[in-house]
Image (spheres, rainbow, N blue to C red):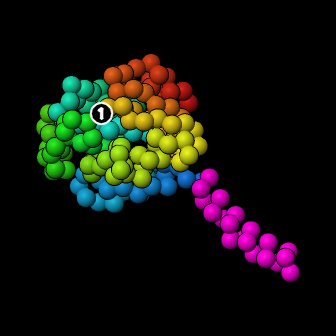
Amino acid sequence: MHMKKLYLLLTLILPLFAMAQTTNFHSFTVQSIEGEKVDLSIYKGKKVLVVNVASKCGLTPQYEALEELYRKYKDQGFVVVGFPANNFMGQEPGSDEEIKQFCTSKYDVTFPMMSKISVKGDDIHPLYKWLTQKSENGTFDAEVQWNFQKFMIDENGKLIGVVSPREKPDCEKIVSWIENR
């Protein structure tokens, strides 16, 4: 009788462990800056650079380098995904529509932009909880330091690296990762 209970308990619990271990970047659904749902599994097979962006930051000119990187490598299995966030000194106060207008008119951004989210604090978006907590991503803890922090996601949706906000998008660490096939 105890064996049957144990078996039943294991059949209920084991799938939960399997689900926890298979969570990766591709497991999430987010909202685009246009308001459409985006299943991040569309990026399976691509290297993804996830960046929290802001329009009124000293690092805002990095949009230009992010766009250049995207245009240079987008046909080689690479994508930049921008997540506007207003977590640092109110440097992204605009609505999604205003942010999109700013990015396209000032920096001609064509890489995918998502809806504004929170990247830290009590209202942290689930994706950023996964990106920043080893207990979620299984790799490492990486608190978001400021706007334009860059998270490197491999083709299988695994977090493999982080680059500080002040590092330029075309730094050696990112470029060598993209070019390493």
Choose between 169 and 136: the one closer to the eye.
136
Answer yes or no: is residue 108 visible. no
Choose between 163 and 143: the one closer to the eye.
143
Residue 10 inside the magenta-drawn segment: yes
Question: Where is the N terminus found, in terms of image quarters?
Answer: bottom right
Indicate whether 14 appears above or below 100: below
Secondary element under disc 1, as helix, strand or loop, is: loop
Indicate whether 143 appears above or below 38: above
66 horizontally vs 103: left or right: right
Spot occupied by residue 82 in the image (x, y as percentages of width and height): 32, 41
Spot occupied by residue 24 in the image (x, y as percentages of width and height): 53, 49
Residue 150 inside the magenta-drawn segment: no
Answer yes or no: is residue 127 visible. yes
* Residue shown at the point (15%, 45%) measured from the top left: 94
Spot occupied by residue 146 in the image (x, y as percentages of width and height): 32, 32
Spot occupied by residue 52 in the image (x, y as percentages of width and height): 32, 38
User: Which residues fall within the magenta stretch?
Assistant: 1-21
Quarter location, residue 160: top right
21 horizontally vs 153: left or right: right
Q: Amino acid at mark 1?
A: Asn
* Residue shown at the point (34%, 60%) measured from the top left: 37
Question: Total marks drawn?
Answer: 1
* Tag 1 residue: 147
* Residue shown at the point (59%, 43%) measured from the top left: 138
Quarter location, residue 109: top left
* Residue shown at the point (42%, 36%) measured from the top left: 143
Choose between 116 and 63: the one closer to the eye.
116
Choose between 133 and 2: the one closer to the eye.
2
Question: Where is the C terminus found, in terms of image quarters?
Answer: top right
103 horizontally vs 53: left or right: left
